[in-house]
Amino acid sequence: MSADPRGAEGFRLGNEILAFRFVATLSERRGDPVERIPTPERLSAWLAANGLGEAGLPVSEALLRDARELREAIHRAGTAVAGGGVPDPSDEELLNRWSSRHRARLVLDGGRARWRLPETDPARAALAVVALDAIATLGGQGDGMIKRCEQATCGGLFVDTSRGGRRRWCSMATCGNKMKKANLKSARARSGETPAHRGEHA
């Protein structure tokens, strides 16, 4: 997992799964939601930050709406799988429609794998890569178990590959840190310890 979960554009990039990083473009789902792709330009920046095209890739308002629809289908499907169920058929159909548009090619460039997008409608092709990743992950092609983040306001998704399946958060650096701070604050409140008391103990 990335030590720094946020890229230069302020996106949450710490998740190992591309499709679940896309889900995180709407964060704090169970609290005060934060839309991280409010404009076509921000969606373009997210794609570039995840190796799906160059900076400034053209994105229309219509494609932004379609992208958010895809994002929410991935989230609903992942939440269903995390709860021991199966995705709704309408969400499966939407993901399958997106994957059928998959026209990007995975190429070696300087010893590194990267996606080469078609010249026609490259942003849509980039989102098809996200859909394909979602299908592979939700369909169990990788190791680990799909889970929903336990941090109270998050609602994000991740794949737990830890020994014993004990991972609880989508990112230790963000949600895990919040949970630890909240637990520490709660423990101090129960013990009656205040910041002033901590200073006296120092």
Image (cartoon, rainbow, N blue to C red):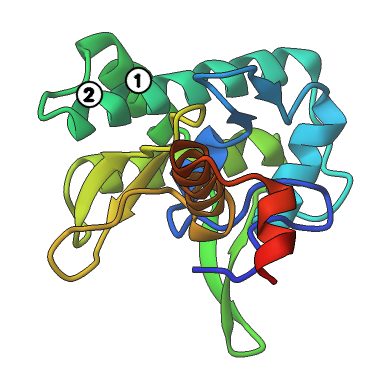
Report which quarter residue 98 is drawn in. Answer: top left
Question: Up-down: is 191 above or below 110?
Answer: above
**Answer yes or no: do the residues labelled 1 and 2 have beta carbons within 8 Å?**
yes
Where is residue 22 shown, x and y percent of the image?
55, 39
Q: Amino acid at mark 2?
A: Ala
Q: Is residue 172 above or below residue 169?
A: below
Q: Residue furthest bottom?
A: 111
Distance of mark 1 from mark 2, alpha carbons? 6 Å
Q: Residue at x 49, y 58 (%)?
A: 172
Amino acid tagged 1: Arg
Identify the residue position indicated by label 1 in the image.
Answer: 76
Query: Along the horizontal axis of the image, is 178 left or right of 53?
Result: left
Q: Which residue is mark 2?
A: 80
The C terminus - image quarter: bottom right
Counting from the top left corner in percent of width and height, residue 168 is at 32, 49
- In the image shown, does 168 or 4 lie closer to the viewer? 168
Q: Residues within 10 Å of mark 2 (few under 14, many from 20)?
A: some
**Image check: 73 left or right of 119?**
left
Q: Residue at x 39, y 47 (%)?
A: 133
| Nearer to us in this view, 129 or 158 | 158
Q: Secondary structure at mark 2?
A: helix
**Can residue 36 be seen from the camera position used here?**
yes
